[in-house]
Image: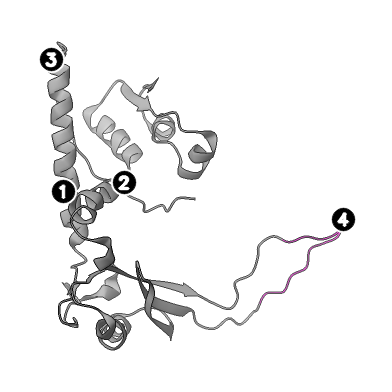
Amino acid sequence: MGASERNEWSRVAWKVTIAGVLNSRRLVFVDECGTHVSLAPIYGYSPKGKRVRLKVPRNRGKNTTLLASMSTEGMGPCLAVEGSTTAEVFEAYLEYFLAPELKEGQVVVMDNLAAHYVGHMPLVSYESPGATILDPDLRRRMQEGAEQEARTMLEAQVQQVGKSGGEVAGVHARLGRPDAEIVGVADELGAGLIVLGSRGVGPLRRALMGSVSDSVVRHAHCPVLVVRE
């Protein structure tokens, strides 16, 4: 299954603006996860005609949250707390666990979780010598880089169409889920037909990752023509 928040434009932007410049050995990723004691399987086995009986804790208490870091060297400093991640908890993790273990030249990467901010400012006050904590606003800068890259590619395609005797009425570059953005632009323009290419992915990959063309066909408010590549 693919994460619902997976954003292909951001992935491309990361490859262009960050991964292509920084040595991966310098990157330290920080994230959180939570669990509780009442987690239990939702399926079970029993003899035919017999009811499946399982036990699930009734009083599970608070969630347990794990804050951890990871790099090419493996797992880094971890902190387990009772309850959810707050700005105070995250600040303590940075100051007392992560920062003392950072090496010169390492770059800490985190998402834009609200707990990573104090007011509107990211928590960047606790840094070991030589290490850098990336502003969670990096996402915006990555998107800008991805949009510029997309426009460059589109302009090249427009020139190719022009050389073939064709004419392009307009160019639109959007960031987000490809299927949703295509349907959205088509609605804004009042398009009478959407023409898409299809990579012809296999049935397993289509089931796991989905298909942009399939989604557009299901959600578009105008006819869709899918051309097999």
Residue at disc 3, secondary structure: helix
Residue 169 visible in the snapshot: no
Quarter-wise, where is residue 196 in the image?
top left
- In this rendering, the answer to whether 173 lies above or below 48 is above
- In this rendering, the answer to whether 206 lies above or below 158 is below
Residue receiving disc 1? 145
Of the image marks 2 and 3, the number of the one nearer the N terminus: 2
**Which kind of residue does numbered mark 3 sit on?**
Lys
Of the image marks 3 and 1, the number of the one nearer the N terminus: 1
Mark linked to residue 8: 2
Distance from disc 3 to disc 1, alpha carbons, whole Å, reads 28 Å
Q: Nearer the viewer, mark 2 or mark 3?
A: 3
Q: Residue at x 46, y 40 (%)?
A: 210
In the rendered structure, which segment of residues is drawn in magenta?
44-56
Residue receiving disc 3? 163
In reply to whether residue 50 is colored magenta, the answer given is yes
**Which kind of residue does numbered mark 1 sit on?**
Gly
The residue furthest top is: 165
**Residue 92 x/y as whole percent:** 29, 87
Q: Residue at x 50, y 44 (%)?
A: 208
- In this rendering, the answer to whether 92 lies above or below 229 is below
**Residue 172 x/y as whole percent:** 18, 33
Label 3 crowd (10 A; few <14 / some 14-19 / many >=20): few
**Residue 63 x/y as whole percent:** 49, 79
In the image, taking residue 197 as reference, residue 106 lies left or right, namely left
Of the image marks 4 and 1, the number of the one nearer the N terminus: 4
Q: Nearer the viewer, mark 4 or mark 1?
A: 1
**Which kind of residue does numbered mark 4 sit on?**
Gly
**Which kind of residue does numbered mark 2 sit on?**
Glu
Closer to the camera, 189 or 70? 70
